Image (spheres, rainbow, N blue to C red):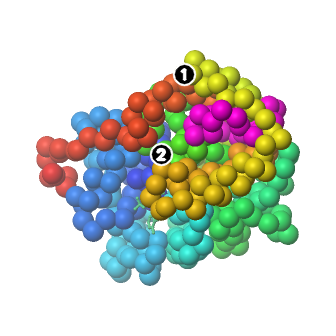
């Protein structure tokens, strides 16, 4: 029995792999884009060093097989022999790879729809052979589209007449639809993470976009949000644990789970207060929202590559998700795991301190392997 995982070297993927390594003896077959084993191992190490040291990683490599795969390529870039070998061995799939480029419809359509379809067709072939035990699709709460001041349950999130904030959300919504259509009658689970921010147990992160947007906002003298506006942030370790745990369950109770903080999501005031120990003094002034939206748009038009343009671009794409005061009820995942995510306000100050000290960059270390595993 083997699990095929896409997006394994990504931020959330690294958490899923780390959890799977501790929960199952099944072989993990990781689809990683890379011309050769050395490149694939190096890419995987970049994600996994958040969770383990080089010796532990080297040990873990014995339980993992890295295959090249590109969602943009025909048949995922697999030759006949690779496909046949995978069809013989794979018994479940976790599809986590995606383009999160909210500004590029082309990237989102190619990666999330065309590529997603290729992964699904592989799973369909497995199912036709009676071999598919489970297909897990990592989607997003953004499939709920334009919202304001709502608490949303899993089954109420997708309404086809509703507009979406961006091509990323739209392609994820269609991605879910494709899973339900292509794998009707098979065992599949759809996971919808909220805003993934930090680990919850330690302050390190390898993903900075949303952290930068939130900290950029907290560093402003005035923040145009209502004090009681909630932001559905979830610690990434919780999302990784949920995906691994539920994927391995014999019979999950539901076919879709919000991986989110739900009704207990922190308010804008609680978030800013939690960052007071690191010097955040921003005041909340909701009436200023329109001028702020205008400022973000103007910043986005600053010279390409400048810091101002970078922050403006981030705020332009993330602002709708920060200001919509909408949360995604998480009773299902709490029921399955038996515990809640770590409240963001408990680790926000440590995260703030660490990302600033590291200038929004992870202090990556090079890998030196001591045997033949794609050695440096
Ligand atoms: N981060 C969040 O806040 C958040 C919230 C909700 C849902 N999600 C979902 O969680 C999943 C993982 O997101 P993440 O935050 O971990 O993003 P990430 O760090 O950017 O990881 C994306 C992964 O997808 C892979 N990928 C992209 N294009 C590919 C292609 N053409 N062929 C093969 N692999 C490709 C990347 O590989 P390369 O390194 O080769 O590009 C990487 O492994 C996504 O499905 C995302 O929609 C994330």
On the image, the x and y values in percent for residue 63 come to 33, 48
Is the CB of mark 2 within 8 Å of ligand 1?
A: yes
With respect to residue 214, does 273 lie above or below? above
- Rendered residue at 75%/49% (across/down): 291
Q: Is residue 229 left or right of residue 214?
A: right
- Rendered residue at 45%/29% (across/down): 354
- Give the residues in magenta: 215-240
On the image, the x and y values in percent for residue 341 come to 64, 32
Q: Is residue 42 left or right of residue 217?
A: left
| Residue 133 lies within the magenta run | no
Circle 1 sits on which residue? 278
Q: Is residue 156 left or right of residue 98?
A: right
| Residue 226 lies within the magenta run | yes
Counting every numbered tag in the picture gives: 2
> Of helix, strand and loop, which one carries label 2?
loop
Q: Nearer the viewer, residue 357 or 72?
A: 357
Q: Is residue 234 left or right of residue 118?
A: right
Circle 2 sits on which residue? 207
Q: Nearer the viewer, residue 146 or 373?
A: 146
- Rendered residue at 63%/39% (across/down): 217
Crowd class of label 2 (few under 14; some 14 to 19; many from 20; radius 10 Å) = some
On the image, the x and y values in percent for residue 61 come to 29, 47
Occupied quadrant, residue 343: top right
Q: Marks 2/1: CA distance?
A: 21 Å
On the image, the x and y values in percent for residue 142 come to 70, 55
- Rendered residue at 72%/48% (across/down): 292
Work out which quarter of the rendered image holds the N terminus and state it: bottom left
For the question of whether residue 309 can be seen, the reply is yes
> Of helix, strand and loop, which one carries label 1?
helix
């Amino acid at each position: 029995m083997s699990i095929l995982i896409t997006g394994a070297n990504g931020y959330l993927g690294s958490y899923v792999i780390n959890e799977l390594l501790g929960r199952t003896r099944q072989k993990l077959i990781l689809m990683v884009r890379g011309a050769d084993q050395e490149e694939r191992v190096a890419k995987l190490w970049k994600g996994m060093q958040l969770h383990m040291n080089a010796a532990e990683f080297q040990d873990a490599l014995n339980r993992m097989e890295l295959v090249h795969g590109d969602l943009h390529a025909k048949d995922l870039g697999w030759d006949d022999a690779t496909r046949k070998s995978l069809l013989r061995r794979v018994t479940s799939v976790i599809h986590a790879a995606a383009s999160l480029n909210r500004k590029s419809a082309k990237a989102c359509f190619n990666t999330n729809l065309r590529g997603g379809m290729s992964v699904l067709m592989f799973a369909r072939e497995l199912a036709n052979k009676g071999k598919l035990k489970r297909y897990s699709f990592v989607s997003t709460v953004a499939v709920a589209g334009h919202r304001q001041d709502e608490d949303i349950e899993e089954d109420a999130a997708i309404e086809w007449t509703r507009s979406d904030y961006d091509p990323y959300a739209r392609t994820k919504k269609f991605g879910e639809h494709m899973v339900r259509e292509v794998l009707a009658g098979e065992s599949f689970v759809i996971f919808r993470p909220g805003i993934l921010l930090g680990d919850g147990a330690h302050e390190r992160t390898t993903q900075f976009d949303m952290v930068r947007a939130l900290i950029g906002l907290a560093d402003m003298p005035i923040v145009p949000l209502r004090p009681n506006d909630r932001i559905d942030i979830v610690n990434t370790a919780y999302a990784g644990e949920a995906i691994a745990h539920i994927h391995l369950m014999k019979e999950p109770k539901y076919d879709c789970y919000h991986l989110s903080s739900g009704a207990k999501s922190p308010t804008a005031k609680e978030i800013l207060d939690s960052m007071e120990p690191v010097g955040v003094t921003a005041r909340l002034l909701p009436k200023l929202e329109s001028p702020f939206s205008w400022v973000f748009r103007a910043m986005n038009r600053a010279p390409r590559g400048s810091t101002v343009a970078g922050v403006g671009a981030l705020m332009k794409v993330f602002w709708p998700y920060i200001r919509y005061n909408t949360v995604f009820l998480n009773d299902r995942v709490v029921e399955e795991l038996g515990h809640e995510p770590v409240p963001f306000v408990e680790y926000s100050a440590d995260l703030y301190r660490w990302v600033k000290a590291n200038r929004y960059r992870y202090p990556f270390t090079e890998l030196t392997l001591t045997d033949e595993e794609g050695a440096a």
